[in-house]
Image: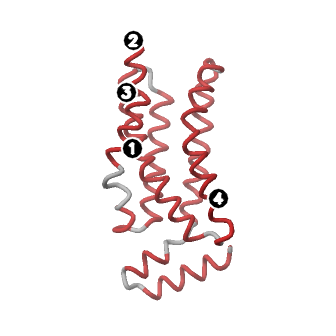
């Protein structure tokens, strides 16, 4: 396989992120953060399984493009969501940790691949498991009170704030 073709994997990821960043995060303002984050996680899990099973370089490049697009949904929305749900004294640390883990995940994937090539499918299985855990957490979270408030749904905003107050 030619090196330029292999380089398209990472380029596809960042191109997908860049192009979709112009419109996908705005879906959270229309449909609410919880469900956009939830479906972004579902889509990312599907793409991780595709990458796990893929034996074709071009399918992998396409999957990474879509994986980048789903990442443009998940990180900005999750960060905004975390800022709304977390106590203010922990916000900076938690959102910085979220960004660092997300940004370094691609680096760790490549490093793991080059050091444990024979166990690489196990690695993707662990990523699918971690994403599934995140997905299950997204189901349990209340919708953003700011989303409800912006829509004039004040009673639902109060209910969401009470749920948030229970774990803050």
Q: Quadrant of the C terminus?
A: bottom right
Residue at the bottom extreme? Answer: 155
Q: Quadrant of the N terminus?
A: top left
Is label 2 or label 3 in front? 2
Q: Earlier in the sequence, mark 2 or mark 4?
A: 2
The residue that mark 1 highlights is 17
Q: CA distance from mark 1 to mark 2?
A: 24 Å
The residue that mark 2 highlights is 2
Q: Which secondary structure, mark 3?
A: helix
The residue that mark 4 highlights is 94
Q: Residue at x 52, y 65 (%)?
A: 81
Q: Foreground: 116 or 140?
A: 116
Marks 4/1 in contact by CB < 8 Å: the verdict is: no
Marks 2/3 in contact by CB < 8 Å: the verdict is: no
Marks 4/3 in contact by CB < 8 Å: the verdict is: no
Q: Residue at x 39, y 80 (%)?
A: 150
Q: CA distance from mark 2 to mark 3?
A: 16 Å
Q: Earlier in the sequence, mark 1 or mark 3?
A: 1
């Amino acid at each position: 396989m030619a090196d330029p073709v292999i380089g398209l994997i990472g380029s596809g990821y960042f191109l997908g992120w860049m192009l979709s960043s112009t419109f996908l995060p705005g879906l959270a303002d229309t449909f609410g953060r919880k469900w956009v984050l939830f479906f972004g996680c579902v889509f990312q899990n599907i793409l991780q399984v595709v990458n796990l099973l893929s034996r074709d370089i071009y399918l992998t490049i396409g999957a990474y493009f879509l994986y980048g697009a789903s990442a443009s949904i998940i990180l900005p929305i999750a960060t905004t969501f975390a800022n709304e749900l977390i106590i203010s004294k922990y916000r900076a640390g938690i959102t910085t940790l979220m960004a660092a883990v997300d940004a370094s995940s691609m680096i760790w994937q490549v490093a793991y691949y080059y050091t444990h090539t024979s166990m690489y499918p196990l690695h993707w299985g662990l990523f699918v498991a971690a994403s599934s855990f995140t997905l299950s957490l997204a189901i349990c979270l209340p919708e953003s009170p700011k989303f409800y408030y912006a829509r004039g749904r004040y009673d639902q905003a109060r209910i969401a704030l009470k749920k948030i107050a229970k774990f803050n």
